[in-house]
Every structure is written in C-alpha cells, then in structure tokens.
Amino acid sequence: AASMFLRLLSDIQWRAAHPKWRRMTSSQRSTSTTAEPHPVSLPAQAQVVICGGGIMGTSVAYHLSKMGWKDIVLLEQGRLAAGTTRFCAGIVSTARPVSIELKMAHYSNKLYQQLEQETGVQTGYMKTGSISLAQTQDRLISLKRIASSLNVMGIPCEVISPKKVLQLHPLINIHDLVGAMYVPEDALVSSANVCLALATAASRNGVQIHERTCVSHVTIQKGQVTGVETDRGRIQCEYFVNCAGQWAYELGHSGEEPVHIPLHACEHFYLLTHPLKEPLSSSLPTVVDPDGRIYIRNWQGGILSGGFEKNPKPLFTEGRNQLEIQNLQEDWDHFGPLLGALLRRMPGLEALQIMQLVNCPESFTPDMRCIMGESPTARGYFVLAGMNSAGISYGGGAGKYLAEWIVNGYPSENVWPLDLKRFGTLQSSRTFLRHRVMEVMPLMCDLKVPRWDFQTGRQLRTSPLYDRLDAQGARWMEKHGFERVKYFVPPGNDLLDLDHSKTFYKPDWFDIVGSEVKCCKEAVCVIDMSSFTKFEISSTGDQALESLQYLFSNDLDVPVGHVVHTGMLNEKGGYENDCSIARLSKRSFFMISPTDQQVHCWAWLKNHLPDDSNLVMEDVTWKYTALNLIGPRAVDVLSELSYAPMTAEHFPSLFCKEMSVGYANGIRVMSITHTGEPGFVLYIPIEYALHVYNEVMNMGQKYGIRNAGYYALRSLRIEKFFAFWGQDLDAFTTPMECGREFQVKLDKGMQFLGQEALWEQKQNGVYKRFTMFILEDHDTDMDLWPWWGEPIFRNGRYVGKTTSSAYSYTLERHVCLGFVHHFDEKTGEELVVTTDFINQGEYEIDIAGQRFQAKAKLYPFSSLFTQRRRKDEVELSGYQRE
Amino acid sequence: FYLTPSQVNSILKANEYSFKVPEFDGKNVSSVLGFDSNQLPANAPIEDRRSAATCLQTRGMLLGVFDGHAGCACAQAVSERLFYYIAVSLLPHETLLEIENAVESGRALLPILQWHKHPNDYFSKEASKLYFNSLRTYWQELIDLNSGETTDVREALINAFKRLDNDISLEAQVGDPNSFLNYLVLRVAFSGATACVAHVDGVDLHIANTGDSRAMLGVQEEDGSWSAVNLSYDHNAQNEHEVERVKMEHPKSEEKNLVKQDRLLGLLMPFRAFGDVKFKWSIELQKRVVESGPDQLNDNEYTKFIPPNYHTPPYLTAEPEVIHHKLRPQDKFLVLATDGLWETMHRQDVARIVGEYLTGVHHQQPIAVGGYKVTLGQMHGLLTERRARISSVFEDQNAATHLIRHAVGNNEFGTVDHERLSKMLSLPEELARMYRDDITIIVVQFNSHVIGAYQNEE
C-alpha cells in the first residue's frame, strides 16, 4: 500500500526527466538478503550534515546551497520524501494566526510556485485558493482577524458571505454558515515532488544526498558538534541539522549529551476517494471547515479529506516501535465523526466511492508552534521539526530562516516564537508530551481565543505558596511549566468557568481584575512572581563586572546595592533579553529575567562569557520565592515587619538590600515592582516563603492588603507603557526604538555588544518606534477587545502592528502598544520614524476588520493619574516583563 | 440530588459476575461460552438468590435464579442445596456407590459441583453438616432404589426439586438440638422461594421452573433481528392451566376461595414454591411446630397466622414444570430472571437488548475497505450504527448489568435515561420496594459453532 501511495500522491517522474540526478544508492527495491553495495561512499567530513530527507531537510539543504554553502551532506534513512512528507495532504495555506508562521507560509507559496521552472521537476503546483468556513460568529471573528493580518501583508484575502462560498465551490452546503474567508492565492502541491525538486536543486548546487543511511548519533565535544555516526561510517562536521521529523526527539536523545526536542507523534487520518462522475476540477478551492474539524481538497477528480479529531491517538510514546508501525492501519470508527462532518458539509458526495483511508503520523509540539534553532547545550546542533501537520506550508520559509541562522548566526525575522530555546528539559518528559499533544492536536481546529491556557501538563513547577493561594481562589495560567496566578476569585463568586472566559469580547473577570488594580493603586497587593528566571554571577576578581559590562548596554559599574534595568543586546542592538541586575557586592551580581528566558539566556551567557574558572554562573531560580508588594502602603507593611525605615530617603527606588522580614533573615528586598507603581519585590529563600507570606498578609490587613494576579500586573504595566520582552521586545528591537535610550550607556567607557548599531541609530534615527495607543471610540462592553497583532493605520495607511494590549482601569480606556513604521508612500521603502511623524498622525487600530480611532503617545500618562512623585523615585519608563 | 454516572455504575456493578468456560487447546468444546449474572436489590436485604455450577461427575452446567418471599432464608437454602440434589439425581449408580464408600471410609469425596460464585454469594457454614446429612440420606435411598436405568434429566430435575422441598419440611418438623440451627430450619420452612433452573448439556437444554421466575431463549433470525422464545410458564394466577391445576387438586367446595385477588388463598402470588409450609402442612402440624419452636418464632405474627379457608392442604407444591429444548445455532443466549425484570420489560425487548449487546461486544471488528466498493454514504451509515451500538454498550462489560440498566432506567423511548436511572437508584430503602422489585438475571451465551457441530453429527 505504501508504494502505491508513493505513486498516487507524487507521480514521481524524476528518473526519466532528470538523468543528471546523482543517485547515491541503488534504486532497486531488492528483498534479497545480501546487502546492497553503496556505490558512493560517505565523505569523511563535511561542513554541514543534515539528517532527514523530507521537506524540511531538503529545504534547509536547498537554502544553504543557495546562500553559497556547498560542503553539505544530506542523509536519509529510507528514501527521499518517504516519511510524513509523502503522506502530506499538500495544502499550502497562508491562513495562520501567528505572524511568523504566516510569513513562512507566504514565502513557501512563492517558492513552490517557481520551483518547477527552476528545477524542471513537476511539483503539481496549482493555485486553487482556499475557503475557511465559519459556522459561528466567534469563528468568523477569528477569521476576520487573520484576514486583517493577511491584507496588510499584501496577501489577497476576502471575508465572504455564504452565497459567495457557493459560487466558489458548488458542492458546499452553506445553510449552517455565517460567513467565510477566501484566500485566492493558496495552493496545492504534490509535497513529495516539491521535496524532490528541492533536493534536485540542492544537488545541482553541490549538496551530496545519501539515501538509506541512518544516523545513529551525533558526537558533541565541549559543547560543540564534531560529527555524526551513521550505519555507513562517521562524518566529521561543524554543523548538524536534525530534520528527522517525528524521530527528531529520539535522535536528539541518542547521543551522550541529549538535545531535548519536545515533540510527539499522533496518528492523522485522511480519506481518498475515486473521481466523481463528473471529475472535480483541479482548480477547485480547498475547503477548511474548522468547526467541523475537517479540510477537503480536490484530488485526481475526487477528494482528499482529513481532519483533527477531538480524541487523537498519540503513538511512539516509547520511541520507535515496530508493532505500532505495523498497526498503522485505517481506523474507520475513529474517522467516523470526521466523515460525518464531511458529508454534512458536502452532502452530494454520499455516492462517491472510497479509495482508502490513509493513516500518517504527524508530530506535534507542546505549544502548537514548530521547533527551529540551535540547541542551547551544543553549538552547531540545529533543529527543524515538529510542524504540527503544516509541514508543506512552512517548509520553504522554515528552511530559509534556518539556513540564514546557520550562515549568518541569526535569521532575518524574529523567530523567537519558534525557537527551540523556548523549551527546556522540563518539556521533554514523554508523559508530558503524550498528554499535551492530545490537547494540541484538537486545538488545530479549536477557536483560538485570547488568554488561552493549556489544561494538560499542569502543576509541574509551583511556588511553595501554591496551595495557600489556590485555597484563596487563585485561577492559574502556566508559563514555562510554572503555575502563575491570573487573578483571585472572591469567595462566593464561582460563575467563572473556563468556557465563560472564552470570548473575543469583555471577559467575565473584568471586575475582579479591576478591584485588584484598584487595590494596587490605593493600598497594597501581593503577587507571587516566583517564576522569574534568576541567575547569580560572581567572580574572584573583576571578571564578572568586566564580562557583564560587555554583554549589557547599561552601566553595571554602580555602587553595591543598586539595581540596573538593562537590555542584553545582540550585535544589531536588538534585545536578546531584558533584565534587572542587582549588584550584590563588588564581585557578584543577581540577575532577574523573564520566565521563558531560563534556557535562552543561560545559553547566551554560556556562549559569550569567557571560559574562566574564576567566573561562576549559577541558576538560582528554584532557590527563591518572589513576592511583589505593589502599592502605596507596601512601604508601611515592610517597615513594620522589619523595624527598618523603608521610606525613599532610606530605601530609594532601584535599590537592593538583604534584610529581615518577620523572623526570617536574608531576604533580598528590591525597590522595583515591574509596574511603575511604588513597592518592593522580596526574594525569599524558599524555606521562609510561607512564613514571610503569612507575616506580610497579617501585617498587611490593616493596610487593606489583598492577593492579586498577573492580569492586574499586565493592566498596570501596559497603561504605564512598559514593554515586555517576548511580547513587545525581541531580537529585532533596539532600546532606541522603544524609548529606552536612557538604559544605554554608549559612553560607559568600554565596548559592549550592540554598541555600534546603537551609535548608528542614535545618529541616523530609527525605522520603527514603540508607541502607545489609547482607543477613543471603543466601547468596552460592546466592542471586540484588542489582543495583539492588530494592524495600526496612520492616516489610513498601514504602519505596523500592535504587540500587546490591556484595559486601563485608570484611564477607563483600552491601551494598545505597538510599533509604528514609516513606509514611503510610493516605493514602500522604510523611512526614519521621527517624533513628529508619530505625533502628527491620525491613528486607527483594526480589530477583526473594524477600525477604532486611537490616540498615539510616546510617553506614559503617569503624571495624569498618579500624584507626581519625585523624579528620582520614578522608575522611569520602559521596563517590564510578564 | 442526583447520582453521578460513576456512582450509578458502582451501584449497578456491585453484584455483577462473569464466567467464561475455559478453552482447551484454543478450542471450547462446551455449548456454553459463558454467562454474565447480576442482581440489584430492592428489599433490604435482598431476597433473590442465584447459583451457577458445572457438574463434575456428569456433563452439563446448572444455572438458577431463586426469588424468596417472607424473608430470604428459603431462597438461600435452595440456592445452596438444589444443585446438589439435581447433580446427585443425575449420577449413575456406580458413582453414587463410590461417593458413599468414600464418605463411609472417611476418604476424600469426589467433587460433585464446581461453583461459579460472586463473593457476595455465601453458603451457610453452620447448616452444612445438616444439609449434607439430608443429601446423603437422599443418595443412599437412590442407591437402594437402583433402577438400573439411565437417568432421565427431566425425572432427575423433578425428583430433586421435590426431594429438597420434602427435606426442608422434614428438617423443620424434626428440629435441631442446636438452637441457632433449629431457628434456621424453621425460618427456611416458613419462608418461601421460587426457582428457575437451567441444565445445559450439549444441545440439550432443560428448564425446570417452580413459580414465577422465567427462562427465555434469545434467537437471532436470518435477517439478524432478535426474537424471544419462552422456555418456562409462570406459575401464577395469570396462567389458566395453573389455576385449573390448583382447582383440580381440591374439592369443588373450595373453588371460589382458592384464588382470590390473583393470589393463592388470597395470599400468595406464586402458585408453586419451595418452603411455605403454611400452605403445605396441616393446621395441627403448624400449631405444634410453632408452639414447640423457639420464642422468636412465636413472636412472629406471620408464622402463627393460618391462611383462611384452609381445609385440604397441601395447597402448594415445589414440583417443577420441565421444558426440554434442543439448541440450534440460531439460539444465541438464554436469560434466566426473577419477576423483577419481567415486570418492567417485555421479553421481546429483553431479547433485542441482550442480542445487540452481545453482538456489539463480540463482533465489533475493525472495518477495512480493502477491495470492496463502498461509498461515503454507506460507510457513514455503517459507522453511525456501530457508534450507536457502542455508546449504549460501552459502560457495561456484563450483559446482565446492561439489562438491569435498561430495566431500571428506560424511558418511554426505550433508551436509558440517566436522570431516571439516578432517581430510581437513589430511592431510600423503604421506598425502593414500592417502585421496583429485586432483580436477578443470568444471561447464558451459547457457542453456535459447537451447537452447529453437534447438529451435523446427528
């Protein structure tokens, strides 16, 4: 059956058409027991070895060779395009909610379109367009949001009526539809042939392709890839690229030093039929019916239809298992609901004859985004895998970004949402992955609403106060495996179940968070912020200071006890991390970074710090519980608990001191709150956590203390125009572009990473500017809420996208943060963005196709709604993380 | 308040039991594949009993349900003892001799029955010696009587029923020096029990019935549908022949008093039963036994009370009606159940529900299209049907449990209504008996291949 489908789906003709193809192994499918001789032996060394001859591996090879790298070997354990790629449904769809994924799909589409011309290999490319159907209003809203993103990228896209759907595709039953989205340039390809075309082009560019060669493991010495061991011998190499698809996890674990690639396979089913009596046109659009959980494309006059069922069947949990591979059979009972959805959508197909139900495993990741990038522990070990069944859509773009990453050291776009380093060992448990992918696969079709939280794989990392907070009504979300409080449901108020919060409109926790914010403003709140990444860096001499001065843009040579907000920048001046660093002593520093920086920041520091045994770095994240006391009365609570004066004269802003709180000594108190409000963060050795929390809550009673969660914090930081790394800030954003020049000390007397780029920006100006928008004619109760990723229009022209948003309870308005660009009206070229350019525009924010007037601000409102504080007390602008 | 589905399940499954006839060399040579049984109490404690055993010295399997009244003592005794009486009745002369010799010389006894019991199905330890002695007396008589003829199953069943009832009566008249046992035998005799027993040996199925429990055969028609064949007659006022029989056995003068309000002498629902000596003994005997009996017995109004118009006892017999049926390949299963089931469900529905359950569980093979021509519509229809079957079935691994779920929870559309089920199961003890009776069910599944092979031999 397998070979039949190779023929059916791919119609491979490369042998006749391309006599130049350098086939490295015999093509005979010999069953004789004598081993086939391999005509061409493996090279002893190569610059890059790519493992996996599917769409990912060939795309990486193709792009690397295009960029001029020639010394590349691609190894495939079976035959090219014979894995998941062969079974791929071949739908190239740009309708993706995540911006970077959308860009990858867009590039892939353009690449595939010209691939046949470039290589001479038939790819079956057909521009059919796609129609995404909405059975509910909420679904339509989510489609409209995607349509807005596509439109501003210049990808034609239209939200259409059910009647129009019928005109585009006569077989569709439109009676239960409220609308649809039509993307006319989406395409179909034969994915196996695309893969062969990429291989052909790569091969012509000098890439050596060896089929039937199995990588057993990768050798790593001193944190650097040195070679691969295969069943046909060893190849020395500088770079290794793991494109092993669903086997990527196992391959990552095969060496002595494991590389954790968190993905897990699930069975995926689709149906093939015989042609209709009147065969379907090959140009008929592909139909995606997410509410029915199915997709339908034309296929050789009949249809190909598959879907993402609610009850997926994970497999290969225990690794490659022959029994499971053999049992990969059609499971009609499992496919039943999807078949029902298909016939409901196209009742006219009842009499269509079945050809086969195909079962092809797909790999899924813990957050439904693919995995690319370099291993945090092994330099030169790159990964591209975990496509969540969108491999053909991402293949071209993903291969391009990874090739750029290998060649240049960084890709041309912000790929942090896809970076392998967003995960650590903690997402590598097979049990966790098995449970999580069972939630992720159905999510492919579920409505993506704001503030979605995964339900599986929870309660892994918790604060010692978890039970205590939970008992007080805490509702939880998860970041990097750590449970964090969203808000506290007051006693007796239990209308808040999960489904209630699933809305694009005003959520049910609105008033609850409002009262927490009010308490932060007027009294004092405590937020458990233990999830933050905490490192200690110390040295015997000045090594720590000297190294950090090079890695951070702000001046760290401050008196002991001072806290510095600073970016950890790359050469282009972009934020690799955004952190607060306290100087604990002359020779030791305490560094606080966002929760999901734990792996990335560690790897960055490891790679950039000198290899000096006198310089010690330690991850102390787990050692401290962090309590953030926010509000004007925080000072009273703390001074009563410590018998120490905490007023600004004794404890100025951005200050750090070890002191006693209650009976507990050695508590690191810092006068920062990450919100712009007055207060302190207490870093408490975990064994004191409960004691200190109890003391704070008891003492705080008379000052009106209460618990609060991250939603309140988020509202506070956004109305104060604080940017957050990972959401607003990324490796392509410099401090100059977000009004944080004051955190850059260009003249600190020594060189630092990114300095040159920042100098240039200081002289020539910036090409985008972080801006705050206050929505003017937006009705909080009735209108759709902004989320992030909404297009920003200036004088009717697209200038950028929002990166985060929140309701400001103080302004009683929605606040969106985002970047404004200046595109030349004629050429589209990016121009310098000046303050005048920002201030002199009329702005609108597009929420799911509806535009709302917005007022642009470059500085926060703080003076308008809080009492003006002394200048040195104010945590000046622009530092925040969540 | 409502019970959750899992609470409902734990109630329904508390007494379920399944037995599969073991296979040898991958082959099952028995005509019985196995059986599922279960019971749901309405009385506290439950008055129904069930038994199942394989005959070890002869071929065949015995299964029975027993519905007690006026307490559970009689049903309990019958459930423990009746199969031994039947097995002994079936034994050839040599085997009886062998057993008697073994007992005489204190050697190990040949095992007669292999019981298939749920942990809740108990045997009385205290009475075992007494019961054994009565049984031994019975086989000693059988040895003395040695007719030399091969044992007829029908005769054996009738003899066993009558003999056991006789022993129950005698033990109560003689009494026992042990006061606990003395009270026990009296309670056994003064309470009553119906019995519906199946004996399966190859294609020969015998049903011996006394009272108003019922045996029903599930037959699969050629078109796949299910029909029910009765293999017993209820012994109650609705059975004309039974009313006729009772009238024939008593003088004309009593005729109008024999059956009143559909009850024997206006009191008893079943017209045949074990125990119930109040309907069997003379008034003098009853008075003598009660007066000489323990105080507890005297305090009991029921035992002292003499039925009205009581002139020519006995009015009641334990003699069973025996029906013989030759099993055919289309006979897929047998349901034995107490009247608690039949009051709520028509036999036709029982046949359908069990039939669909058994085929659903055992024949839900994966579908493969292979080389067949199947349309999307056909496949969808097939899958929908399979799913509907599974959704009602998947909760139960036991056909008897499945049947009880339907009996208690069925709504007007014939489907299980969880709300109704939950209500019925959460009734307080004192109310439960008003809405439902004890239900005891055994579902025996036959091996059509073996039965087909038997047929071919003949």
Image (spheres, grey):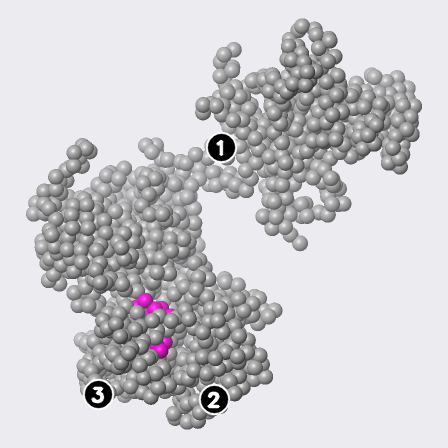
Please count the marks in the image. Answer: 3
Q: Which quadrant of the structure image shows residue A787?
A: bottom left
Residue type of the residue flagged with mark 2? Met
Front residue (pair B409, B162):
B162
Horizontal placement of A223 versus B174: left or right?
left
Which residues lie in the magenta part? A590-600
Residue drawn at the location 58% of the way across and 81% of the way down: A701
Residue A749: give its label.
Answer: 3
Q: What is the crowding at mark 2: few (fewer than 14 residues within 10 Å), some, or many (at least 20)?
A: some
Q: Which residue is mark 1?
A: B362
Mark 1 or 2, closer to the camera: 2
Rendering coords of residue B174 (x, y %): 84, 23
Q: Kindly identify the amino acid type of the residue bearing the numbered disc 3.
A: Gly
Q: Chain of mark 2?
A: A
- Which chain's residue wears label 1? B
Q: Position of residue A218 (x, y in %)?
A: 22, 54
C-alpha span from label 3 to label 1: 82 Å
- Kindly report the distance in space between the C-alpha atoms of the residues bearing marks 2 and 3: 34 Å
Q: Which percent across, then down, holds residue A195? A: 19, 51
**Left or right: B185, with A169 as reference point:** right
Q: x and y percent of residue A7 in the render?
A: 21, 41
Looking at the rendered structure, the kind of residue marked 1 is His
Q: Identify the mark nearer the N-term, 2 or 3.
A: 2
What secondary structure is found at the residue carrying circle 2?
loop
Residue B233, by quadrant, is top right
**Residue depicted at 12% across the width and 39% down the height:** A37
**Rendered image: mark on residue A646:** 2
Q: Chain of mark 3?
A: A
Measure the C-alpha gap from mark 1 to mark 2: 76 Å
**Residue B115 sits above or below residue A614 on the image:** above
